[in-house]
Amino acid sequence: MTSQSATIPPRTIRLGTILVHRGILEEQQVQRVLEVQERTGDPFGLLCEKLFGIAPSIIESAWAQQYASLVDSTDFTEVTPTPEALEMITRRQAWQFRVMPISWDGYELTLATTSNDLCRALRFATNVIDRAVYFVMTDSKSLDDALVKHYPLPGVNAARSRAA
């Protein structure tokens, strides 16, 4: 009989911690947001916007960092996208929104993107894709190589796409 060890989920990096590390908020401001959140139930990021005038784009960027730290990552040298997934987005969408479909299980589309492209990719998925989407993270080189291979553009190679 083999024993299986329980996996411990990764510790979530809190949005407030990210904002403090970026110099956007101070610890006292985080505590103030948490106090108001406890009373109102409003999302942390929304309260940061309301209470301290933080731009939504800054909250979105911090959220993307938080999300990227929680999800799996992939390397396209080890993953082959399924034909069904590749057919779900166009070449233009793949390049414009920097997403690479990996798999479709009949319910959920798995897309890869980079942490720098996650906000744009999420807006695309939310506004255009009419099904559940799960994101995994990859590095820019791996994404570029996969885009060149599966959604080729005339005159574009991976090295050129990274330089652009």
Image: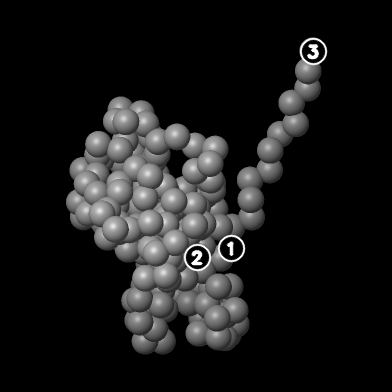
Rendering coords of residue 80 (x, y %): 45, 34
Q: Which residue appears at 68% of the width and 43% of the height?
A: 8
Rendering coords of residue 65 (x, y %): 50, 65
Q: Which residue is mark 1?
A: 13
Give the position of the C terminus as an image quadrant. bottom left
Q: Which residue appears at 27% of the width and 53% of the height?
A: 153
Residue 164 seen in the figure: yes
What's the CA distance linking mark 2 and mark 3? 41 Å
Q: Give the amino acid type for the residue marked by disc 3 in the picture.
A: Met
Rendering coords of residue 106 (x, y %): 30, 28
**Which of marks 3 and 1 precedes in the sequence?**
3
Q: Which mark is residue 1?
A: 3
Q: Which residue appears at 49% of the width and 57% of the height?
A: 141
What's the CA distance linking mark 2 and mark 1? 9 Å
Query: Image quarter for residue 82?
Result: top left
Q: Give the amino acid type for the residue marked by disc 2 in the picture.
A: Gln
**Which of marks 3 and 2 precedes in the sequence?**
3
